[in-house]
Amino acid sequence: VQLVESGGGLVQPGGSLRLSCATSGFTFSRYGMSWYRQAPGKERELVASITTAGISTNYADSVKGRFTISRDNAKNTVYLQMNSLKPEDTAVYYCHAADWPTVYWGQGTQVTVSS
């Protein structure tokens, strides 16, 4: 099983990034997918989640209206479009797959928002 995040980097406040999580080794379309993040000294928190068919999404209040989660079941990939980025969005972002009780995590990608 692999979950490989990409698309992180350094961006100025107000900028945008698109994270991708390419997966393999499991039946992607059966798993709910989420993005979590963890800032230095803080607990890991849920950012956004999407159901198996992509019909329903959920967002943390702190990112509503700025972030969009989507998935392509044909490509076994989940995305996180991040707009209007703020310094407080700086964190390591992790891809998460769940078909309870089975859970998989990616290794994370660093997002730094700074001028």
Image (cartoon, rainbow, N blue to C red):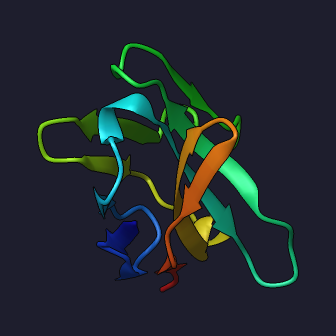
**Left-right relation of 36 to 32:** right
- Which image quadrant is residue 22 in? bottom left
Residue at 51% over, 81% down: 112
- The answer, for residue 31, to whether it is visible in the render is yes
Of the pair 28 and 68, the residue shown nearer to us: 28
> Residue 109 placed where, x, y %?
46, 78
Looking at the picture, does residue 22 appear above or below residue 74?
Answer: below
- Which image quadrant is residue 24 in? bottom left
| Quadrant where the image shows the N terminus | bottom left
> Residue 54 placed where, x, y %?
35, 22
- The answer, for residue 63, to whether it is visible in the render is no
Of the pair 50 and 88, the residue shown nearer to us: 50
Q: How many marks?
A: 0
Residue at 32% over, 49% down: 79
Residue at 40% over, 38% down: 69
> Residue 17 placed where, x, y %?
32, 63
- Which image quadrant is residue 41 in? bottom right
Looking at the picture, does residue 114 appear above or below residue 56?
Answer: below
User: Most extreme residue toward the left, as rendered?
Assistant: 74
> Residue 45 placed where, x, y %?
75, 55
Of the pair 92 and 21, the residue shown nearer to us: 21
Looking at the picture, does residue 44 appear above or below residue 107?
Answer: above
Residue at 54% over, 68% down: 93
